Every structure is written in C-alpha cells, then in structure tokens.
Image (spheres, rainbow, N blue to C red):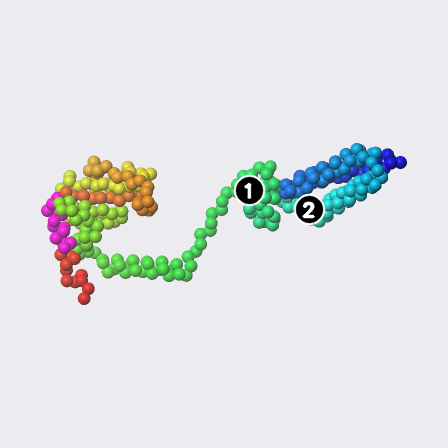
Amino acid sequence: MLGEIDDALAGQVDDGLGLAHRGAGLVEGVGLERSTEKGVELVVALLAGLRAEVVADREAEEETRSKLRHRIVFTLWTLEHAFDTFDTMGYRGKLLEREEARRLRATGMTMPDIAAELGVSRGSVSLWTRDVAFRPSPRRRARRREPNAVQRRKQAEIEELLEEGRRRIGELSEREFLVAGAALYAGEGSKTDGLVRFANTDPRMLAFFAAWLRHFFAVDERRLRVCVYLHEGLDLDGAVAFWSTLLGVPKVQFRRGYRAKAGSTIRTSKHATGCAYLSYACSRTHRTIMGLTAALLSSPGCHPG
C-alpha cells in the first residue's frame, strides 16, 4: 500500500517538473527578465529534490511521509497557480507587444522610440528584438522654422539701417577717402617706425586699405609683401590665392604663411582665408601716415565737449 502511495507521489512530482519546464519555455519565449528565469529554475530544482526524497524515503515512517506529501502538494499548487496567473494576468499582452516591437525594429525604429511607443522598458525591447536585423532609418531633416515676430522686426531694422548708412556715406570725396584710410590705420595699422603694415581678417578692410595706400602714395609694387596667418587644417594655398587676387599682389611676394596650432590661448573661431598682413617697407610713407593719424586724433572735432 505504501509503495503505491510513493509511486503516486513520484508521479505528481514528475507532472510538476513537466509544468515547470513548460513555464521555463514560456519565460524564454516572452523574454522576461532574468530574475523570472531564475525563479523557474529554482522551482524545477525544488521539485527534483522532492522526487529524490520520495524515492529515498520509501522506508521512512508514516509521519515523515505525511509531511513530505504536504510539501509536494503545496509546491505543486503554488506552481500551478503561478502559471495560471502567467497565462491569464496580462503576459499574453506582452506577447503582442513583443511582436509589435519586433515589427517596429525591423522598420528601423530605435529602441528608445519603440519603448516609448509601446510603454515598456528599453531592456524588454532589447531582449525581444536582439535577433532582428536592424537598418537605421534615414534622419529626417528638421523643418526650417519661420522667423518669429521679434526676429522679423530685427531683420527689417537691420536692412533699413544698412540702406540708411549707404545713403549717408554715399560716394566718398577725395578728402573723405583720405580721412577714412587714416582712421582705419589708426585702429589696425602697425606703429613701428619705417614699416607700413595693416592686418585684418575682413577682406573688405584689406581691399579698402590697399586701394587707399595706392591712391595717396607712390607705391613701389615690388616692395609690397603679404603674410597669411592661418589655423592648422585649413587650405593655405587656397588662402594665398584668394588674398593675391584680392590685393593685386603676386604670390611670389607672399612670405611663408604662419600656421596657428590649437591651444588654450588661441581663439577657437577660424576664418577660412585666415588673417592677412599687408606690408610696405618705406619710412617716409609710414611717417606720413602716422602724421595723418595724429592729426585726425587731435582734431578739435573728435573730442567730447
């Protein structure tokens, strides 16, 4: 009689092991967290241990057998209840979300976007779609935003004042041209005696000064020199060609360009054509220019009050 009971208990444990293995398959198919997989493995191990006890305790007393039967019944009931919950409390919904996640991933959607779309964690999406071939979707260009009211007013004011400036300056007279060139040199020119040198990154400034120098002084073109200051990584030959054409100075009269290396003391802004230095070695010309700038800065009209 006791042998029949032992066989029945062993059969129940075997049924429980089958149920646990089915649960492990469901966990793997749905892609639940590793902690859930560990839980199923623990149940399998527990049931396997109980079966070993049934086989080993055939000679045990009836009281021991009764305790063992209670443990088996309780474990089987817990396992069946857990997988009933697994089947009926929402995990089928996860299966649907898993399939949708795989479909979206195949279209090129990123994992964060899929997680946000389905309301699931990014980790779940990663588990569900790890074997799905992925080709990133081409990035969509951001739509260009139309300027707002403040920006439109600002641009309108800029255009209006540019036009007003052109009207007020008009075409420079001989004297106005002379004064303007002297003012430019007072701000950007070299004060070292004997050497006329003007440097700037703005091509319009260099072109204005070169025209001014040639207009008011008898310049020996062969003595003009240009040096280009350029950041590393930019096209030095292209910059030299640009300044040569703009200033009307042959390339053979360009000194060796200066390459600026990256460093904490150098500005990060980089001009594609660099900074050009236009030089003319003539003491008389330089002293004449310094006389003009001194007269300009000491003029009664340029002092407050």
Task: Examine the image and state in which quarter residue 272 appears.
Answer: top left
Mark with earlier residue (2, 1): 2
Q: Quadrant of the N terminus?
A: top right
Residue at the disc numbered 1: 108
Location of the C terminus by quadrant is bottom left
User: At 61% from the left edge and 44% from the top edge, which residue is drawn?
Assistant: 124
Q: Is residue 26 left or right of residue 159?
A: right
Near-viewer residue (223 or 7): 7
Secondary-structure class at tag 2: helix
User: Residue 21's x, y, as percent?
Assistant: 72, 37
- Residues packed near mark 1 inside 10 Å, few (<14), some (14 to 19) or many (20 plus): some
**Label 2 Cα neighbours within 10 Å, binned few <14 / some 14-19 / many ≥20:** some
Is 110 on the left-hand or right-hand side of 244? right
Front tag of 2 and 1 = 2
Q: Which residues are magenta?
A: 282-294
Which residue does the numbered mark 2 point to in the structure image? 91
- Residue 3, which numbered label? none
Amino acid type, residue under disc 2 in the picture: Tyr
Q: Quick one: 177 or 103, which is closer to the camera?
A: 103
Q: Which secondary structure is most common in the magenta stretch?
A: helix
Please say if the residues under marks 2 and 1 sit with CB atoms less than 8 Å apart.
no
User: Residue drawn 28% across and 60% down?
Assistant: 164
Q: Position of residue 235 (x, y in %)?
A: 31, 38
Q: CA distance from mark 2 to mark 1?
A: 26 Å
Evaluate whether residue 219 shows in this view.
no
Q: Which residue appears at 66% of the width and 46% of the height? A: 94
- Mark 1: which amino acid? Gly
Q: Would you say 20 lies left or right of 256 here?
A: right
Residue 215 included in the magenta stretch of the image: no
